[in-house]
Amino acid sequence: MSYFDVPEIKFEGSASRNPFAFKHYNPEELVDGKPMKDHLRFACAYWHTMRGTSSDPFGAGTALMPWDDGSDSLANALKRVDVFFEFIQKCGLDFYCFHDRDVSPEGRNLAETFDNFDAVTEKLLAKQKETGKKLLWGTANLFSHPRFMQGAGTSPSADVFAYAAANVKKAMDATLKLGGEGYVFWGGREGYNTLLNTDMKRELNHLAQLLKMAVAYKAKIGFKGQFYIEPKPKEPTTHQYDTDTATCMNFLREHGLLGEFKMNIETNHAELAQHTMAHELAVCVDNGILGSIDANSGTQNIGWDTDEFPTNLYMATDVMLAVLKMGGFTTGGLNFDAKRRRESFQPDDLFLAHIAGMDTFARALKIASEIKKDGFLEAFVADRYASWNSGIGAKIEAGEACFDCLSEYALKQGEPLATVKSGRQELLQATLNSFIR
Ligand code: XLS
Ligand code: NI
Ligand code: NI
């Protein structure tokens, strides 16, 4: 039984005009001695690929999904697993990610919901064994159902908090069962729309309690995967508590949780936080907490999460420079948390969208590797800070200077303007451009 009238996607090289072929992604090709597929660790998002209908606030879904009967039945959910695995297999995506509710429907009560989930994860496990595909990370959807309208871990209702915790526990069990390499906490509706009705301090303490329980439960069941927080500043709530990496780090530090979590950084979220993706990744790399990446893109002039497939080579190059700088992914990867545009409604558009993203990152990997080997950026930055390597600079860095001695130094030294060198931003941008080919 085949659901897609599309062949297995193969590498044909940059001269190929076959839309159903990779022009740059050649999984086994070595870059710096490591196969491209191990550098990139591409993952498919179950929610967008299988459950995205391409509806928007002004119109119904347009996506053609001939395999889906549109019902919330368990049988339909089980059938989607077959479709999904055919898709990731043909598209050469080695990993996938899911929320509990993407793969299995709510039941009439929590026990039935759990039973549904068990039935589907059994099938996911069987399919993983059959195909060799792996789970990059799992998570719980604590934002779609009306019960979570005012948050989950930060809901004003303790009963909702307990319900959310039960679902996190279950989703962690499932991730362990499926050999998942990570587990994501994205804030969902953890935030507020107005402070008039919100006890922010109490809500944040509750969120910390939820995470502490998750850490304890992780040890209890022996889940060795990596926990990630996925920052996002707004949408669905006006203010999301996990605004950006720096905010998340401070929260984790305050609650003694810093060593337990890394970040899952999403391009579109970085942009919504008025940062660049490069900034968010740099904060992570500098602090040793870059875990995984939700590879997508926003639209610069739009203020919400459009989750487009990433095709911007400059942005992808920034991403791969950061990934190479940290020495490559360990548990993480590049998850296409991306949806095709509403107008791209045909089933084969799922392939074309992923091919576009995969080829973009394959090129970016090669470009970033060349930039790294050339070393011009590192050399420039090292030279820019050379005054800190000896003399007064080294003394300050070592914590051996004080205001009195610096004042004495400055009075003797005179005007420092002559020691300031050009930042050469335009030169660096032009040099970087010459690698993008
Ligand atoms: C939503 C988030 C979400 C997470 C997983 O904006 O990106 O899809 O990645 O819960
Ligand atoms: Ni995401
Ligand atoms: Ni998002």
Image (cartoon, rainbow, N blue to C red):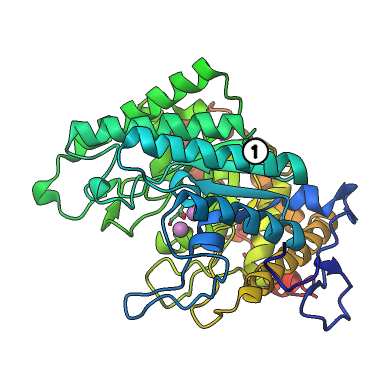
| Residue 64 in picture, x, y percent from top left | 54, 75
For badge 1, the amino acid type reads Leu
Q: Residue at x 50, y 44 (%)?
A: 410
Q: In x, y percent, where is residue 272?
A: 41, 63
Residue at the far left in the pictured view? 196
Residue 248 in the image: state x and y as whole percent.
Answer: 41, 41
On the picture, is 338 further left or further right than 407? right
Which image quarter holds the N terminus? bottom right
- Quadrant position of residue 429: bottom right
Residue 272's place in the image compared with 416, above or below, is: below
Left or right placement of residue 411 versus residue 436 in this view? left
| Residue 287 visible in the displayed image | no
Up-down relation of residue 268 to residue 398 (above or below): below
Residue highlighted by disc 1? 125
**Residue sitting at 74 percent across and 64 percent down?**
364
Using the image as rendered, state which of residue 122 and residue 173 is in the foreground. Answer: 122
Question: Could you tell me which residue is drawn at 50 percent across and 49 percent down?
Answer: 103
- What quarter of the picture does the C terminus occupy? bottom right
Residue 172, position in %: x, y?
49, 31
Q: Residue at x 17, y 38 (%)?
A: 156
Taking the view exactly as shown, the residue that stands out farthest to the top is 220
Seen from the viewer's position, the closer of residues 84 and 31 is 84
Is the residue indicated by label 1 positioned so its CB lies within 8 Å of ligand 1?
no
Q: Is residue 193 above or below residue 311?
A: above
Q: Secondary structure at mark 1?
A: helix
Give the number of callouts: 1
